[in-house]
Image (tube, rainbow, N blue to C red):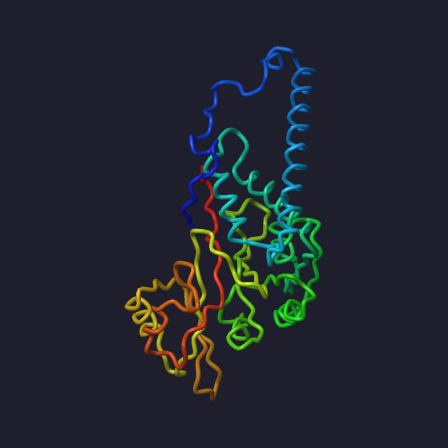
Amino acid sequence: MSSSVLPANDAHAASGPAEPGGSDPTPGDGWRTGGLPALRAELDRIDTALHDLLIQRAGVVEYVARSGKPAAFRPGREASIVRRLLVRHYGALPPVALVRIWRELLAGTTSMQGGFSLAVCDSDRGAAFTQLAREHFGALTPLRTYTSAGQALADVSQGGASVAVLPYPSDLENWWVALLHHEPRLHIIARLPFWTPRPDGSPATQALVVASTPPDPSGDDRSFLGLECDSDVSRTRLSGELTGAGLKPETMVLERRQGSPIANVLIEVEGALADDDIRLSRLGAVLRRPIVIGSYATPIAGGVK
C-alpha cells in the first residue's frame, strides 16, 4: 500500500537535506585521514551528541506529560513524525532502519507518560501477532496475549491494557461487530505493520490496533465505517451508494448470521472521517446512521526517500 508523505516542517528540513559529498558539518576532518583510532573517536563523539539530544527530547516529553494531554499514544502524530524524517533522509542507512529506530524511541517516550501496555490476540503458532506488536510498540512494552479477540478487547475496555492488537477483519474475523454497540466506545486507531514491503523473516500478517481513545489524523489516513443493513444487501449496491456520497470504498466485509434480518458491514474508505460527516447521511441502504469505528495512518511503502 503506497502513501504520500508529509512535507518537512522544521527549519532544517524546509531547505532540504544536505547532499552526500557536501560540506562536512563536523568541526574539522581529521577523522577522515587519521586512521581507525580517529574514526572510532569520531563515532564516540557522534554517539555522545546523539545521547545528549535523546536526553533533551526526554525532557520535552516530561513537560508534555505534565501538560495534562489526554493520551500518551498518538498514532497519527507518530506516523507524521516518521514520514517527515523519511522525506529528509539520505545516505547509506536504510530507510527501514530509520523507521525501526524511531519506533523504539517513540515507544520509550510513550512509556514515560504513564503505564502503557498491550493486549494481543495471538493464537498463531509462530506468535506472528506478538512479533508484529513488539516491532511497532517496542521490545520492552508490557504485553499480554489472549487466544480470542474478545478477551483482548475486554482487557482494553476494563482499563487493563492501553491498546489491543487484533487480526485484520475478514469473513472469519468479525470481532469488529462488537465495536458497533460497545459503550463506552472503542476505536480502531492504527494498522500494522506500518512499513511495507516486509523484510525476509518478519511477520507478514496484518493487524489493527483498538483503543478507548479516538484516533488522531496523520494527514494520509483510511477510516472504517460500521453499517447495519438488510440481510440481503449487495456489495454492489453499497459500493454504488458510497461512491455516490463521495466516499471511496477500499475494502468491505459482510457479516450475515443465519436467520437474522440484519447484516453487519465493515467498510474501509479513504480519508479520516468524523461522526458528523455529512456524507454519512446520504446512504440509503443502511438501517441506522453509519458509525465511524476508527481510522489509521496509511502505511508507508518501501523506497520512500
Q: Residue at x 62, y 15 (%)?
A: 31
Horizontal side, residue 301 vs residue 72: left or right: left
Up/down of 6 relative to 184, above or below: above
Q: Residue at x 58, y 13 (%)?
A: 29
Horizontal side, residue 94 vs residue 110: left or right: left
**In which quadrant of the rendered view does residue 163 lie?**
bottom right
Residue 156 drawn at (x, y percent):
64, 67
Residue 222 drawn at (x, y percent):
43, 59
How many dots with numbers?
Answer: 0
Identity of the residue furthest to the front in this view: 67
Residue 9 drawn at (x, y percent):
45, 39
Up/down of 205 relative to 233, above or below: above
Q: Residue at x 55, y 44 (%)?
A: 199
Residue 106 drawn at (x, y percent):
61, 46
Which one is in front, 187 or 254?
A: 187
Position of the C terminus by quadrant = top left
Horizontal side, residue 240 vs residue 40: left or right: left
Which one is in front, 177 or 290?
A: 290
**In which quadrant of the rendered view does residue 247 lie?**
bottom left
Q: Residue at x 40, y 58 (%)?
A: 271
Which one is in front, 168 or 296?
A: 296
Identity of the residue furthest to the left in this view: 244
